[in-house]
Image (cartoon, grey):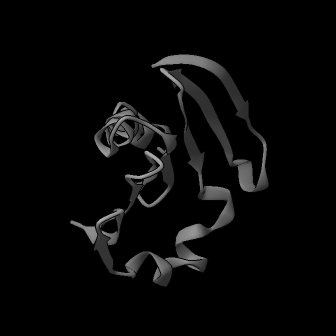
Amino acid sequence: FERTEIESVSGGPGGSGHAQATYENGGHEFTLKVVDLAGFGAMTQFGNAFRIEKNRQDKDGFEHVTNKDGTFVAEKWDSDDEEGSYTTIVDKRFLIKAEGEADNFDELKQAAASIDAGKLTSLAK
């Protein structure tokens, strides 16, 4: 995938912000986004929402929402449209989301995993 667009915003509520980039390859396009949730008090206001467990799978794709080892993860894939999303929250503060079109779900998951969670965590300190 080749990056075709990049955007960053800072100075939101409580100093929060986000960065995102759009990537394209062979007619597929997805967005990779990192959001600092600190200013939103997200884990305090929506903490129970991150404990949701959901599993759905059929011939067209899947949707899984879980809390893996204390980390919120939401995965969604529509194989007919070759479209989906992978979302996780790092250190109860940073949301990482890859969403859009890809050849397969693993491409979105790998894009999200390319964000260095250790560096994000060090930013919070």
* Residue located at (61% from left, 79% from top): 45
| Residue 66 figure quarter | bottom left
* Horizontal side of residue 50 vs 46, given as left or right: left
Q: Residue 20 appears at what percent x and percent y?
A: 62, 34
Tell me what residue is drawn at x 78 percent, y 49 percent.
12
Count of residue discs = 0
34 left or right of 80 in image:
right
* Residue at 60 percent of width and 56 percent of height: 37
Looking at the picture, tell me which residue is in the foreground, 2 or 96: 2
In the picture shown, does residue 46 fall above or below 86? below
* 75 or 115: nearer the viewer: 75
Q: In the image, residue 125 lies at what x, y percent? A: 47, 44
User: Hey, which quadrant is residue 68 in on the image?
Assistant: bottom left
Left or right of 100 in this view: 92: left
Q: On the rendered structure, is 43 left or right of 68?
A: right
Identity of the residue drawn at 67% across and 21% down? 5
The answer to whether residue 74 is above or below residue 123 is below
Among all residues in the image, which is located at the extreme left? Answer: 69
Residue 73: image location, x then y, percent: 36, 62
Quadrant of image for the N terminus:
top left
Picture layout, residue 66 above or below residue 53: above
Above or below for 13 versus 96? below
